[in-house]
Image (cartoon, rainbow, N blue to C red):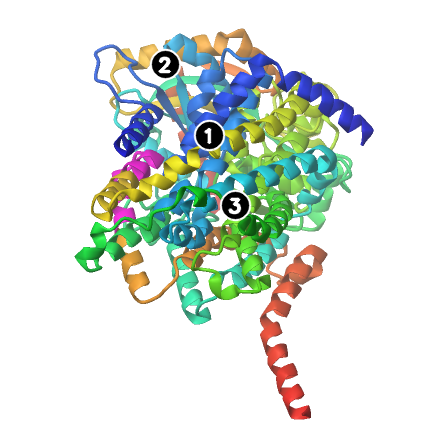
Amino acid sequence: MLRKVIVGLLVSLVFLIGVPLQAAEFPTKEVQVIIPWAPGGATDLIFRALAATTGKYLGKAVVIINRPGAGGAVGYTEGMRAAPDGYTLTSAVTPLTILPHQVTTAFTYKNFDAVINVVSDPSMFLVRSDSQWKTLKEFVDYAKKNPGMITVGNSGAGGGVHLVALAFEKAAGVKFNHIPFSGGGPSVTALLGGHIHAVSVSPPEGIEHVKSGRLKIMALFAEKRFELFPDVPTVREQGINFVMGMWRGLIAPKGTPPDVIKKLHDAFKQGMDDPVFRKNARDMSVNLHYLGPEAFEKLMAHDHEFFGQLVKEIKK
Amino acid sequence: MFESLQHLANGFGIAGTIHNLFYCLIGCIVGTLIGVLPGIGPIAGIALLIPATFSLNATSAIIMLAGIYYGAMYGGSTTSILLNVPGETASVITCIDGYQMAQKGRAGPALAIVSIGSFIAGTIGIFGLVFLAPPLAEAALAFGPPEYFSLMVFGFIVLSNVTGKSLIKSLMMAIVGLIIGTIGLDPVTGNERFTFGSISLLSGIEFVAVAIGLFGIGEVLTNVNQPSELLDQGVIMPRLRELYPSLQDLKKSIGAILRGTGLGFGVGLVPGPAPVIATYSSYMIERKISKHPEEFGKGAIEGVAGPESANNSACQSAFIPLFVLGIPFGPVTAIILGALLIHGVNPGPMMIGQHPELFWGVIASMYIGNFILLILNLPLVPLFANILRIPKRILLPLVILFCITGQYTVNNSVFDIWMMLIFGVMGFLMRKWAYEGAPLLLALVLGPKLEVAFRQSLMISHGNFGIFVDRPVSMAFLLATVIFLLLPVFKIIVKSLKKGGT
């Protein structure tokens, strides 16, 4: 009787964690995607949606694993050290090309093989709708008169939106007080509660709250206006020449076999083209931007150089 | 109010279809299983099952996933009670009195009271969710970094001596926990701290490894250290009529259950480590107001009933910020948020208006699910209680095996297993010299969050410490902390004055 109980428990345990089987055909088990940020942030939301539609084309489930910490360094280090067999991918987001310039990291984009780019989003500043600043001009003027007094939340020190905020400071000739949070979700929550003045994010973070009217877009660092909010002008239209965004794609550890990369790329491409994902992306107002492995590799190489320069200038 | 009831009635209509009842049942069964197994928790369980919901509609999917969540909360304490192995943060406190009850042959009543308490807490929690959700969600937003910091300070000071043994030893253990909590990457600057170049240490020390090590492995080693005759004995055999709580047990527990429910519901609204604060403070309160505090730590049923109820109602109220604001405050609700999104539902302030069938259907299903869990869990009590009939000579190695497999499933990391074993040895030594594990675990959970909130607050205030006392909510917590610290002093003064008078 008791043995049955224990055997039963162990058997169910094995079922729950899944048995890694050896087989020639990729994939034979679920594919993991490491998200180096907390659940509920932009990267997390986008790849959860993509994982859902890609599963059926890949033939195995795509599982999201969050490894937050230190602006992404924890997740990328883990992703880099995973076996290059295609079963562990990492979500590549702009900070991958920023972080190595700021702190000593074990990785750069060169430690990975590009798989696919999925999204490119403009960055933006959100404020509460009842904020004391009505326009970008008021906001920037106040910041000029009171350097370091406006608190701007970001999703982690040295992370992408933090650097965007730093670069915008330089472009607008102002100084903010940057407050790091552990992801875009917590920083938006702090803004909703009125604990900080503004938050540096990129869609879909905070979009639902802009739709409901609790938050508004103070500064949009895009080439063109949002389809969803055609009344919000970009900062370039208002005289500050500053455009910056975030891309989000998938990478595999260096040395993953090319045919495995191709299979993954094809499945995720199909997942991207799936009407369900397209609708989700539209609802989140993220900007789909497909790039194949070579083009994505080039983009990462370009940004690695670009942010290297920017970080050097800021550190001066 | 009336409108809410009408919506709720519609919700029952949706949740009561055979289709949705079926998914509710599956969620509850899987949740119970996940809860019973140490290591694998509701987060991993839900994440693994999200792909299985692709073909379902959004309401059925969330009904099932929510079922896993609260189902795991029911089952989570089973190994704590039987084997002294806490599978997750929420069931650490249950080890203290639950395991002692089991050692005295009262595993049955302990397991049963968990189910009963969870059911009552879940039911009340759902009503809170229906009627109080919108205003409460707004209140939760009032917690910014300074409030959060003060709440943690309060929790830390008040709860570190949770078992009420030696204050000095408890504080020593809390400091050890704080130190362990600093290992890993600095959350604000990203610098490595105490990692000694080890990549495995970058993300810090896994909580589950410390918990299972200190409690589960530590207990096994303590047993092994005893004379070998003792190892041939099983635990005192429970008689059949003692498998379920007596009327006296229920009478003792009901107050604890109700207090735990209220407490858990409030704490669950606050972002962060709600289960830990809820269970620790419930235990603390029950011990303080008990007429026989000396029973705590030796198998007091209130010490099981209160924290387990608190844990369950915290799990219900955690859905409030998710459904009302679209903001997940904890990792489990964050995963459910992801699931909503996958099903084309955008969680946010307009979700209840846009998808009323989903919101009210899920709420009603939680109520039904609580019934299912009660019916599912009570008959399992004798089955689980009988595990203790195994002689220790056979049971203890099995416990080690169980701990190792459980630990491995958390991160698939062998490093974590070594950590667990190291903390097992530490747990053995601590037991030998009468140090408590609970304050260490509390500090390990609260410490890193306390640090981040402290640094964020000071960054916001440009280094001005006034931020902690200028804000009313934060001030209230700090004041409460001071009062708590001064209370014993006042008592002594009052006593000596009285003595002086007579």
- Could you tell me residue A32's position as x and y percent? 37, 24
Give the Cα separation between the discs numbered 3 and 1: 16 Å
Q: Does dot 1 land on a helix, a strand or a loop?
A: helix
Q: Quadrant of the N terminus of chain A?
A: top left
Q: Which residues are magenta?
A: B405-421
* The quarter of the displayed image where residue A229 is located: top right
| Tag of residue A262 | none
Give the Cα separation between the discs numbered 3 and 2: 37 Å
Task: From the viewer's side, name the closer residue of B266 and A106.
Answer: B266
User: For this view, does A203 lie left or right of residue A290?
Assistant: right
Q: Which residue is mark 1?
A: B31
- Quick check: is A285 in the magenta stretch? no
Q: Which residue is mark 2?
A: A60
Residue A35 appears in the rendering: no
Pointer 1 chain: B
* The quarter of the displayed image where residue A130 is located: top right
Tell me which residue sits at (17%, 56%) in the image: B228
Give the Cα separation between the discs numbered 2 and 1: 23 Å
Q: Which residue is mark 3?
A: B308
- Could you tell me residue B68's position as x and y percent? 49, 28
Pointer 3 chain: B
Residue A163 appears in the rendering: yes
